[in-house]
Amino acid sequence: MRARSALAVYLLALVAPASAQTACPASLRPWTRIELHVGLGLAGGGEVSRAQFRNFLETTVTPRFPEGYTVIEATGHYRYKSGKVAAEPARVLVILTKAPNEAAQKVDEIVRIYKTRFRQESVGRAQRIECATFD
């Protein structure tokens, strides 16, 4: 009996951290938050203009996530493959989704298009589960 109790406590300890990550207050539900960190600096100088970025959102992001997203103005600091460190204007695109597997391909497309269109070395990407609601 003691061995069973010890085993049960051990198994609960293993499971608790994983379930605690998605346990939300009653008024909230687990959503997947995806962030894309994009630089606005262009190779050879200059920056992606507000009009160019707005066009990118309208033609690339909105069709893939018509339910919505958020854009945050930022300053990014990045070390290029060459070793050069630069600070540049950036944007953080935040997408909340209940369907992360379906969103993954769309996000991959957004990243590929941004890198190609604006000749970017990389786009930062982060993903986590968080509690949210849209009431």
Image (cartoon, rainbow, N blue to C red):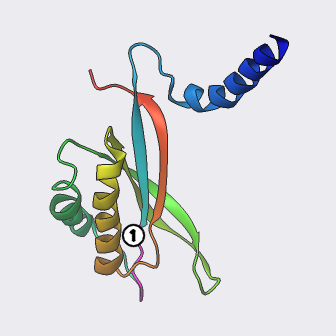
* Image position of 81 (left or right of 10): left
> Measured from the top left, where is residue 128 in percent x and y?
49, 43
Q: Between residues 100 and 56, which one lies in front from this camera angle?
A: 100
Look at the image and tell me whether residue 48 can be seen.
no
Residue drawn at point x = 40 percent, y = 53 percent: 73
Is 37 inside the magenta-drawn segment?
no
Please state the total of marks drawn on the protein image. 1
Look at the image and tell me whether residue 129 can be seen.
yes
> Compared with residue 62, is residue 19 higher up or lower down, i.e. above or below?
above
> Measured from the top left, where is residue 70 in percent x and y?
32, 45
> Measured from the top left, where is residue 91 in percent x and y?
40, 58
Residue at the extreme front of the image, as rendered: 1
Residue at the extreme top of the image, as rendered: 1
> Measured from the top left, where is residue 7 in percent x and y?
76, 22
**Circle 1 SS class:** loop
Residue drawn at point x = 49 percent, y = 53 percent: 126
Quarter holding the C terminus is top left
Q: Quadrant of residue 132?
A: top left
* Image position of 21 (left or right of 8): left
Q: Between residues 82 and 46, which one lies in front from this camera angle?
A: 82
Residue, disc 1: 40
Instruction: State the predominant SS element of the stretch in magenta.
Output: loop
Quarter holding the N terminus is top right
Q: Which residues are magenta?
A: 39-44
Residue drawn at point x = 44 percent, y = 28 percent: 131
Q: Give the amino acid at mark 1.
A: Leu
